[in-house]
Image (spheres, grey):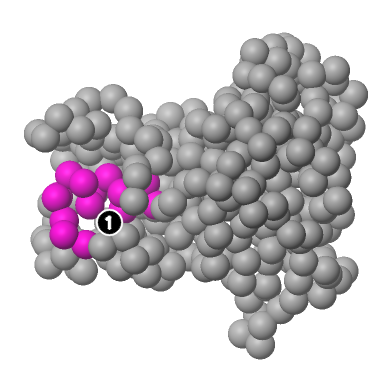
Amino acid sequence: MQAAGGTGALDAGGMPAAEIARAKVNLALHVAGQRGDGYHLLDSLVVFPDIGDVVSISRDGSGLTVAGPYEHALPCSGRGDNLVMKAARLLAEAAGRDSGEISLTLEKILPVASGIGGGSADAAAALRLLRRVWALDISDSALLQLALKLGADVPMCLLSVPARVSGIGEIIDPVRTMPACGIVLVNPGVEVPTPEVFQALRRRDNQPLPDVPAAGFQEFDDLIGWLHGTRNDLAEAAMDVAPGIAEVLSMLDAQGEVAFARMSGSGATCFALTWDVAKAEALSARIAVSRPHWWATAGRIT
């Protein structure tokens, strides 16, 4: 299993002592059913651009330290219950290590409750980081099983590769080829609790995604054409909960750089795909000036 990305200082073995917790972006999301236990059956194409939080080894004490622009969104009193710490303790228990030695910093860059899997990505980054730093002899499949115990989105975030994901999120089929392109993520500054969106969902038995080409998407236009035959089945319900999402999508659709725009996950974050990163960066900068109360950032999909 390849790490999704490191950053910052090096550990004793010369490897980065930090991991980027890449945002999970649902390019398409169909709700195809609901199990008896209440879990919804989803069918989604996900990508992981080079945008995310950062989980790193801390030398300043034990437990979890939170920093970054969205530090305020995580309550100080509940940081022991943060998914990062839950992931770290779960891995320590599986490896027979002392959980008291866990000392991590989470730089919270992604907005919370925003439909891009921030908490799940953070937990996955902690698993990758600690397996490497602790030099654990634990297989990829075993690590994926631990990840699933933390939540349905954590295994896909652990891999952080373009994939078609189905079931409740545990069936992950990597996409062989994905064209390099730019992406802009935009959030209107509102938190959208996922349970509220699912409660507002009008239909839960939609058709699954069309087949993903066996060779993946060779060209950008191939991907865009395929996306036009898909949906995000949560978008209408999410806009009932947070009407500001519609304004974001309307604005993105009107921009010349944008080849395709849609809401990700259960919202409120929306994405815009562009032909290259330069166009994404130009659009993100323009949004930052015209909508300073929104969160907007640019990156790349590879």
Residue at horizontal 71%, vertical 78%? 34
Q: Is residue 236 left or right of residue 172?
A: right
Q: Position of residue 37 (x, y in %)?
A: 61, 85
Residue 132 lies in the magenta-colored region: yes
- Say which amino acid is labelled 1: Ala
Total labels drawn: 1
Residue 74 lies in the magenta-colored region: no
Q: Is residue 63 above or below residue 254?
A: below
List the residue tagged with mark 1. Answer: 88
Task: Write down the region rendered in magenta.
Answer: 124-138
**Magenta highlight: main SS:** helix
Q: Position of residue 146 (x, y in %)?
A: 34, 67
Q: Is residue 287 above or below residue 37?
A: above
Q: Position of residue 210 (x, y in %)?
A: 78, 59
Q: Mark 1: give few (<14), some (14-19) or many (20+) Cα within 10 Å.
A: many
- Would residue 250 be visible to someone looking at this image? yes
Q: Is residue 68 above or below residue 113?
A: above
Residue at horizontal 67%, vertical 72%? 41
Q: Is residue 97 above or below residue 259?
A: below
Q: Nearer the viewer, residue 260 or 216?
A: 216
Q: Nearer the viewer, residue 216 or 98?
A: 216
Q: Nearer the viewer, residue 200 or 209?
A: 209
Q: Is residue 163 left or right of residue 279?
A: left
Residue at horizontal 45%, vertical 60%? 155
Q: Position of residue 302 (x, y in %)?
A: 55, 32
Describe the element under mark 1 as helix, strand or loop: helix
- Would residue 114 be visible to someone looking at this image? no
